[in-house]
Image (spheres, rainbow, N blue to C red):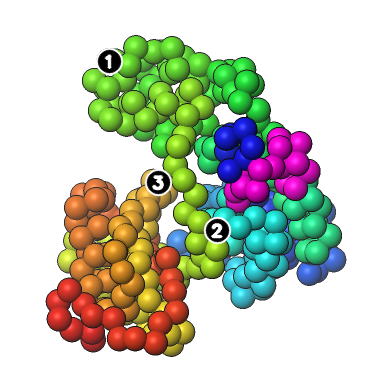
Amino acid sequence: MAADGQRRIGHLDMDAFFASVEQLNRAEYRGKPVIVGGLGPRGVVSTASYEARAFGVHSAMPMAVARRRCPGGIYLSPRFSRYKEISDVVRGILRRHSSVVETVSLDEAFFDLSRHGRSPDEAEAVAREIKRRVQSETKLTCSVGLAPNRFLAKLASELNKPDGFLVIEPDGVQELLDPLPIDRLWGVGVVTERRLSGLGLLRIGDLRRAPLELLVREFGSNGRRLQRLACGIDETPLQGETESKSISREVTFPFDVVETAEIEKEARRLTRAVVSQLRRESLVCRTVRIKVRYPDFRTITRQTRLGSGTDSVRLIEALAVHLLRDRTDLDDRGIRLIGVGVASLSETRELQLSLFGDVT
C-alpha cells in the first residue's frame, strides 16, 4: 500500500479505440467520420470517431440510425485481431508499472499504484508516464484517471476525454461530484434516472443529501449503494489477475426472440463454442458470464464465480442458463442479442471434473 494508507487506483481508456486504430492504419480515414460496428440490418455501432460523434453518432446506436445521421461516414466491420494486438501492447505497458492490472475490455483497464509506498506525487508521475508510453508505443491517445477508488478513477478518465489526464484527490471528491448529473453514477441507467428525477434528485449532490430511508424504501439495498457512490465511497477491490483474459461469443438475432427455450438453446450453442476454444488453448475458467441486449438497446451482464477452474461444457452451460433464468428479465419484450463468456482463465494440464460427473 501507499505510505499514507490511501489507495491510488488508475483507469486507462483508449480514445474511440476501434475507430482510432482504423484511422491510424489508413491515412485517408484521418479527420473523417469513421464508424465501426455490425454492418448488417440489425448492426450496432461499436465505436464512432470523434468526427462521427459530431453528427450525433455514438456506441450502441443502431447502425441504420447512424447512417441516417452521418450519410457521408466511413462504415467498417471490426478487425478484432488488430485491436487485440494494440491492446496487448497497452496491457504490457501497464504491467511494467503496476503489479495489479484488471483488464475490463480491449480498450479499458484499471491499475493499482498503491503499492511500494508511493507518495501521491510519485503515483501521479507513474500514471503520466503510462499515458506517455501508450501514445509513444501505439501512436494512439488515451485518457487516464487517478483516484482513491475504481468508481472515481473511471469517472476521472471520462471527464477529460479525449487525450485527458485527471487526478481526483480525496479532499476534492464532493466538490467534483455534487454538481454532476445523476447518470454519472455507476448503475444509474435510463429507468433509475427517471425514478430519481421523479424524487427531485437530479444531481449527485441531491442524492448524497437525500434521506437514506427514502432511498432504501424506493430502491432497496441499491439505494444505499448509490448514496455511498454519491459520497465517493467505493471499496471494490481490483480483480487483480495480472494475466486477465476472457473468451466470449455472442450473436445478434435478425429479429427479437421472445421464446425462452430458443434463447437458452442459443446460449448452449455459444457455450459449446467458448469451451471449444478453452480446450484448444488448454485453459480452464473460474468465471462464467452472460450478456443480454433488449430491443431498446439496454444491455446487461451477469456473472458467477467458481471456487476452482473448469472446462466442463455441462457445468458452464448450466451456469449460463442459471444466470439467464434467475438473474435476467426474459419477458415478452424479447431480446436482440445474447452472449456467453468465461474469464479468470488459467492454464492447466489436468482434467477438470464437473459437478455433474462428466467432462463432455
Mark 3 belongs to which amino acid?
Answer: Arg
Label 3 to label 1: alpha-carbon separation: 29 Å
Mark 2 belongs to which amino acid?
Answer: Thr
- Of residue 165 and residue 26, the one placed in the foreground of this image is 165
Q: Does residue 74 show up magenta in the picture?
A: no
- Horizontal relation, residue 47 to residue 233: left or right: right
Per the image, the residue denoted by label 2 is 103
* Number of dots carrying numbers: 3
- Is residue 152 depicted above or below 45 in this figure? above
Q: Give the class, few, some or many, for how many residues have Cα within 10 Å of label 3's Cα (few <14, many ≥20).
A: few
Boundaries of the magenta span: 111-127
Q: Give the class, few, some or many, for how many residues have Cα within 10 Å of label 1's Cα (few <14, many ≥20).
A: few
- Of residue 247 and residue 181, the one placed in the foreground of this image is 247
Q: Report if the CB atoms under discs 3 and 1 are less than 8 Å apart.
A: no
Residue 254 lies, in percent from the top left, at 38, 66
Circle 2: element type: strand
> Which label lies toward us, 2 or 3?
2
* Residue at horizontal 37 percent and vertical 50 percent from the top: 300
